[in-house]
Image (cartoon, grey):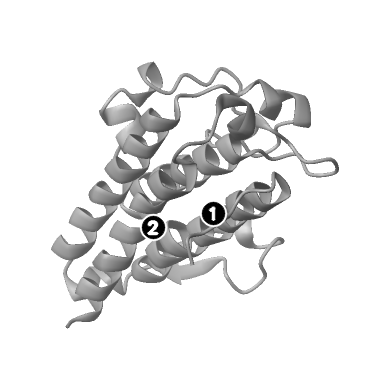
Amino acid sequence: MTATVALAKNLAFWHWYPELLLKGLTPAQLRWQPAGHDTSILFATWHTYRAADELVNGRVLQRPGVFLKDNWAARLPVTETGATPFGNGLTREQIGRLDLDAAELCAYAKAVGASITSALVAMPDGETAAEIDLPFFATVYPGYDRMSKLEAIVFFAIGHTAEHLGEVQMIKGLLGLRGAPL
């Protein structure tokens, strides 16, 4: 098995997983925000895949993201996005107003994963090694403001995704629900 095939399998998992985590949740559970924690299950999930779409497709691959290209704005209407198209800087109140259809959000996550995966498997090795600048990381994550395209894809589409889906599982636990099936 090549590294690209292994990464493609991981991408497929992380972009399918919300379907399992959000299954059976009520709109109230999806929007609930724990005391002292601004996020909600809905926001953490939306932010995760909107960020992967924008950062991998837009920044790394230099092409339009799935959200714009396939008109997901009509299916996932978000009027307040904060400082970035994926919600950075939103207040607790703004996050609390986010109201999206969970099935549409899961479909978007899969579409983002399929887009990134198809680009990854078609990318020549020389291009995966090409370095890109990530200046917005310079003060937040010193030393990670320059990465290869492959590193950035893994960082945003797997690492960042796992981080926020961990938040989803934490919130489910605070609601008295089981986070993950294992």
Instruction: Say whether residue 86 is left or right of residue 31.
Output: left
Q: How many labels, in total?
A: 2
Report the residue at 37% width, 20% height from top: 75
Where's the N terminus, which quadrant?
Answer: bottom left
Q: Mark 1: which secondary structure?
A: helix
Q: Against 160, is 58 above or below?
A: above
Report the residue at 37% width, 44% height from top: 58
Q: Which of these two is toward me, 115 or 147?
A: 115
Q: Position of residue 170 (x, y in %)?
A: 66, 54
Q: Against 105, is 78 above or below?
A: above
Q: Which of the 4 image quadrants contains residue 144?
A: bottom right
Q: Position of residue 105 (x, y in %)?
A: 41, 33
Q: Mark 2: which secondary structure?
A: helix
Which mark sits nearer the N-terminus, 2 or 1?
2
Q: Which of the 4 image quadrants contains residue 152?
A: bottom left
Name the disc covering residue 165, or none. 1
Outermost residue, right side: 36
Report the residue at 62% width, 33% height from top: 29
Q: Position of residue 149 (x, y in %)?
A: 36, 65
Label 1 sits on what residue type? Leu
Label 2 sits on what residue type? Trp
Disc 2: which residue: 14
Instruction: Say whether residue 121 is left or right of residue 111.
Output: left
Report the residue at 72% width, 49% height from top: 174
Q: Residues within 10 Å of mark 1 (few under 14, many from 20)?
A: many
Q: Position of residue 140 (x, y in %)?
A: 70, 61
How many angstroms separate mark 2 from mark 1 (CA)?
9 Å
Q: Residues within 10 Å of mark 2 (few under 14, many from 20)?
A: many
Asked if the residues shown at circle 2 and circle 1 are in contact, with their CB atoms under 8 angstroms apart, the answer is yes
Name the disc covering residue 107, or none. none
